[in-house]
Amino acid sequence: MPFVADKLILFGATGDLSQRMLLPSLCALNADGLVADDLKIIGTARSDHDDDSFRAFAADALEKYLPDDRKSAIPALLARLSYQTLDASKPEGFSALAGKAGKVDDGLAIFLSTAPSLFEPTIAGLAAAGLAGERVRIGLEKPLGTDLESSRQINDAVSAAFTEDRIFRIDHYLGKETVQNLLALRFANILFEPLWNATHIEHVQITVAETVGLEGRVGFYDEAGALRDMVQNHMLQLLALVAMEPPSSFDSTAVRDEKVKVLRSLRYLGEGDSVTGQYRAGAIDGTAVPGYDEELGKPSGTETFVALKAHIDNWRWKGVPFYLRTGKRLPRRATEIVIQFRRVPHSIFAGKGATTQPNRLIIGIQPEENIRLSVMAKVPGLDRGGLRLREVPLDISMPNAFAGVKKRIAYERLLLDLIEGDQTLFVRRDEVEAQWDWIDTIRAGWSEHGMVPKPYTAGSWGPSAAIALAEREGVTWHE
């Protein structure tokens, strides 16, 4: 049985992720009595703090990022916090961290957010200090490498100290309510699953659109680009959840077994199956914004937009294209999945002058969580001029459908699962490596064919070639 940790170490405790997400999530969990009364939280980073100054730092962050109705819970969380300064590149510092943690026989959870270059020394330091034993589990925040080879190096380093059942690779999209609701939609309703195949589905679209530019991630993003930053992890996880076979049960092994089958079935892209772009100066919501090269301060060949046409070579999805699109400085912020069903095989209404449209299921993940199914309905009237049909949306707004239920941010769920030992919403090593294998072949193809990002104006939906990628097959992007 998984153990419940009574200590939690947060690496990068003074960083942006900690301030915006981790500390507010822990405060919410604590306020709702979802963590044990004896849970101790130890922050660590290079920043020079003692316990009191870190608590003051955390209080400022919580005042800034917590909703007003949650701020009364701040003192209770601060009472759980302590701090140990640590330079992860220096092995000798880990003994002080171990001293701060004390005995870990009852269970320790570690949240590790660090640069890829520091994974190996950090894991070695934890192991040498006795912080990697059988009652210790570790959560790993991305990026986990820049390609398959570097990912394997990181995974090998972690596996040398932690068994796979104690390694929790984080993709925060999997903690979002609507992403998990995708599984409920498919596997808790007999309505959809019989239709969830190539016989009834024409194509699938997955879009992750951002309106922001670099936002302080200059160094990381210019090294990564859109393909590695968004497609390799978030978008491929969404694709796997859409395309997976029904697991035998809702547990970590069964769910992840089915996801990895999908990832291993991805067909390598052909020469015309991808488009890359880089934004130029334009306007977002009427406000002028600079181009990527201006924000960066130099010319760059890094893509800020990518569109792909993917195929899954198995029985369920034979011949069904999956269109993936992500980019920065697009017209609106949106993460959504569109399931486009096929047309009815024969319209009985054609003789009456009425046209039918194929059904479409739209699953909105952010900024609004909702599910919309378009169905055909008759327009009211006597029809003396002919029968009229029209698409009617059936909307399920999650906030309205579950009024009074407290909305949770992704990291609340993921931190609680890390503390309690539930791996279902975390990514297994074979998943990560299957994702990197596919991504590496795309990048190799770009290099082989000399592909460079096409310019697009900030505030547009990317290069015109991305529109053509879909329109060649008679598909229009959902906007």
Image (tube, grey):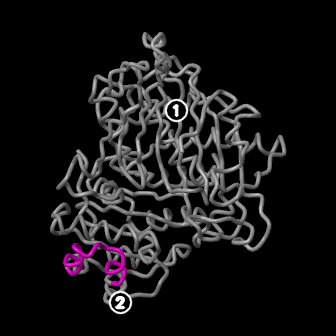
Nearer the observer, 157 or 54 = 54
User: In the displayed structure, would residue 30 be above or below residue 137?
Assistant: below
How far apart, in angstroms, are the residues tagged by discs 1 and 2?
50 Å
Residue at 40%, 71% (x, y): give it: 20
* 336 displayed left or right of 42: right
Residue at 31%, 83% (x, y): give it: 59
Residue 53's disc number:
2
Which region of the structure is painted magenta?
60-75
Count of numbered tags: 2
* 202 displayed left or right of 95: right
* 442 displayed left or right of 364: right
Q: Whole-percent x and y of residue 398?
A: 29, 48
Residue 204's disc number:
1
User: In the displayed structure, would residue 384 be above or below residue 35?
Assistant: above
User: In the displayed structure, would residue 377 be above or below residue 350?
Assistant: below
Residue at 60%, 56% (x, y): give it: 330
Q: Residues within 10 Å of mark 1 (few under 14, many from 20)?
A: many
Label 1 SS: strand
Q: Whole-percent x and y of residue 95?
A: 41, 76
Label 2 SS: helix
* 105 displayed left or right of 232: left
Mark 1 and mark 2 lie on one chain; the one further toward the N terminus is 2
Dominant secondary structure of the residues highlighted in magenta in the image: helix
